[in-house]
Amino acid sequence: MREITYREAITQAMAEEMRLDSKVVLMGEDVGDFGGSVRIVGGSELEPEYAQACREMVESHPNLQRSITFSGTLPHDATPPACARADLLVSAAPMETFGMALQEAVASGTPVFAVDAGFVASHVVEGVTGRLFRSAEEMARGMLELAEDRPTLERLTEASREARP
């Protein structure tokens, strides 16, 4: 197995997991400090072999074990408090017909990073309450940049809280 950096492993894991399962969203906690954590929320029933491979990759890297949690599908009533605790909600769904998780994040005042597809743009004011990206790979790079730029995260969070419905 080729040795990769922590950044490369995070980027690959996020991009692949989100690309293959449109139900997967990430909720970043303490993302402004690079040692923060990522909570992967969503079912694995669409791609069980791939989900297992992701879990095995995380289990094989001690840094990833400390930073990444797989939560599975959340019951609807658990989603609002999870969004409120998160610093950032990330979705790479290739199509959003409405975007319930995005709406929950907006209602919680949590910034959103998402692939610009379907009705995503109706939930995000680009550069104000979040960011819109052309691909999961571009979004993963944007997340890593954000992890090293605490002032931008704080600005997005403040604007998202002010924009709450």
Image: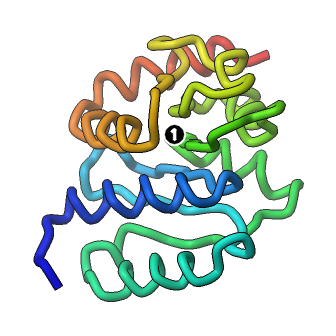
Q: Residue at x 55, y 18 (%)?
A: 129
Label 1, secondary structure: give it: strand
Which one is in front, 53 or 128?
A: 53
Q: According to the image, label 1 marks what residue?
A: 88
Q: Residue at x 67, y 25 (%)?
A: 120
Location of the C terminus by quadrant is top right
The picture places residue 115, in percent across and down from the top left corner, at 54, 32
The picture places residue 68, in percent across and down from the top left corner, at 43, 69
The picture places residue 102, in percent across and down from the top left corner, at 70, 34
Q: Residue at x 85, y 63 (%)?
A: 75
Counting the numbered discs, the total is 1
The colour scheme applied to this rendered structure is: rainbow
Image height check: is 158 above or below 147?
above
Which one is in front, 45 or 106?
A: 45
User: Position of 31 compared to 149: left or right?
Assistant: right
The picture places residue 15, in percent across and down from the top left corner, at 42, 53
User: Position of 81 compared to 142: left or right?
Assistant: right
Q: Please tell me in which quadrant of the rendered image residue 153 appears.
A: top left
Q: Report crowding for label 1: few under 14, some 14 to 19, many 20 or more residues within 10 A (C-alpha).
A: many
Residue type, label 1: Leu
Q: Please tell me in which quadrant of the rendered image residue 84 appears.
A: top right
Image height check: is 43 above or below 98?
below
Q: Residue at x 30, y 87 (%)?
A: 60
Which one is in front, 94 or 164?
A: 94
User: Position of 48 compared to 35: left or right?
Assistant: right
Image height check: is 99 above or below 23?
above
